[in-house]
Image (cartoon, rainbow, N blue to C red):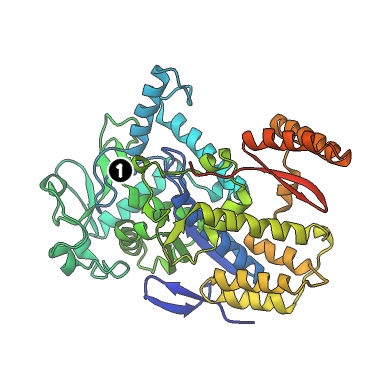
Amino acid sequence: MTPIRFYNTLTNQLEDFAPIDPPVVRMYNCGPTVYDFAHIGNFRAFVFADLLRRFLEFTGHEVRQVMNITDVGHMTEDQLADGGGQDKMELAAQRLKAAKKSGVADVENPDDPFAVARYFEKAFIDDARALRLKIADDEAPRRPRATEHVKQMIAMIEKLVAADHAYVAGDGAVYYDVSSFPQYGKLSGNTLDKLAHGAGGRVSETDTAGKRNPHDFLLWKPDAKHLMKWDSPWGWGYPGWHIECSAMSMSALGVETLDIHTGGEDNIFPHHECEIAQSCGATGKAFARYWMHTRFLMVEGEKMSKSKGNFYTVRDLLKRGVDPAALRLELMRTHYRSNMNFTMKGLEDAHRMVERWRAAAAGVDAQSVAAGDSDVERDFVAALSDDLNISGALGAINKWLNDSPDDLSPLVRMNSVLGVLEAAELETETSGDDAAIDAKVQQMADARAAKDWAASDAIRDELTAAGIEVQISKQGITWRRKMTLD
């Protein structure tokens, strides 16, 4: 079999992949902060993690995937190692409370940040399921909540204090002493020397109060007035963002060294750098062997921003008629280490590819497909073995389809990696709106059969005005909602 090679952010090079305990692969993915609906930039990283998992499973590995739910401690100024600003969960509660006063109530009790977290957590799982992320259907312990692992976080902080990697400041806050960990900066390049000369962002005097070093980062924040607080050896308060992932990953996966840790490139510093420091400080072992990061997503060549009107969540796009299979494919088909430009044209191209695959796979009985070793599957695996070369993998499939193969079962097998043509997609319930559209399409088909072209055109115009695209072929009439980013 072709050796699998991944780019390791920690070493800045391609490396042969070798799990610690083969065939088991223990993988941790930084998940959502459930203060709002996750946007497509978030989901690019989540879809990448799903593709990685599916590929490793396809090549014979047993993947134990964990994706955390951050529901406390993630501050608005997370670009600083210490965080800063306000807790995103508290801000969400305030926003929803204001919305309820104006008559728009998404959460029955927006004063309760736990209720807010559960609302947006469910929304995330629903969106993840729509895009066929396997983690959405895993047992709940594979999606650990930060609020349910505070005990483990406190225990880890106590270890760090005992090992002189952390200290208690005068106000009761607990900080990690970055000078105690000489390897700090190995992942991001923001070494202690570079930080001393201004790398990693400017640190204000307010953020340095009580610290030994300006770049020491928060492990525990004392705040008896915080809406989400726990008792600790340092008083009532809440954990820092970085300690959460270290504690949850080790607890959920049952090991101190992970095989793979993923996230977006914005997580590299400070979040993942801090995770490494505190995890190694607590255990004396390497935290993760392979670090993999997705690059940023832009929309039509610009940074995604609410102020620019180009900020999209998954549910935004699905409501606009975007096929979830096409959205999944579009988020996946740019190599994860390249910036992605999300465009309407790209979505349309992805949709055409999905439709082609659907038509090809329609005559294949998925239940009877046995394991195979066709040329196209070997090319597909070889491409993905090269640092998840998705372009090469998709190119192999489309080149093979161009040759009109008699046996299309390899497409079903390869789809177990891509997750685009899932069986569940064929079992979705038909909504009332869909039934009404189906009825109109049938009327159009009847009119065409009777050669009543005027009636057929009138129905087609009516559907077009309603945002429904009608496609006529030898096989009959099909329809889909028009996709739009407007």
Is residue 464 shown left or right of residue 436?
A: left
How many numbered discs, if any? 1
Q: Which residue is mark 1?
A: 75
**Residue in view at x 37 percent, y 60 percent:** 265
- Judge by depth and name the residue closer to the eye, 226 or 263: 263
Residue 257 showing in the rendered view: yes
Image quadrant assignment for residue 351: bottom right
Q: Position of residue 154 (x, y in %)?
A: 35, 47
User: Element at badge 1?
Assistant: loop
The residue sitting at the left extreme is: 205
Residue 47 showing in the rendered view: no
Image quadrant assignment for residue 403: bottom right
Instruction: Indicate the amino acid at tag 1.
Output: Met
**Residue in view at x 37 percent, y 63 percent:** 283
Is residue 144 shown left or right of residue 435?
A: left
- Quadrant in the picture for the N terminus: bottom right
**Residue in view at x 47 percent, y 56 percent:** 45
Q: Position of residue 401 (x, y in %)?
A: 72, 70
Is residue 24 shown left or right of residue 174?
A: right
Q: Position of residue 228 (x, y in %)?
A: 35, 33
The residue sitting at the front extreme is: 454
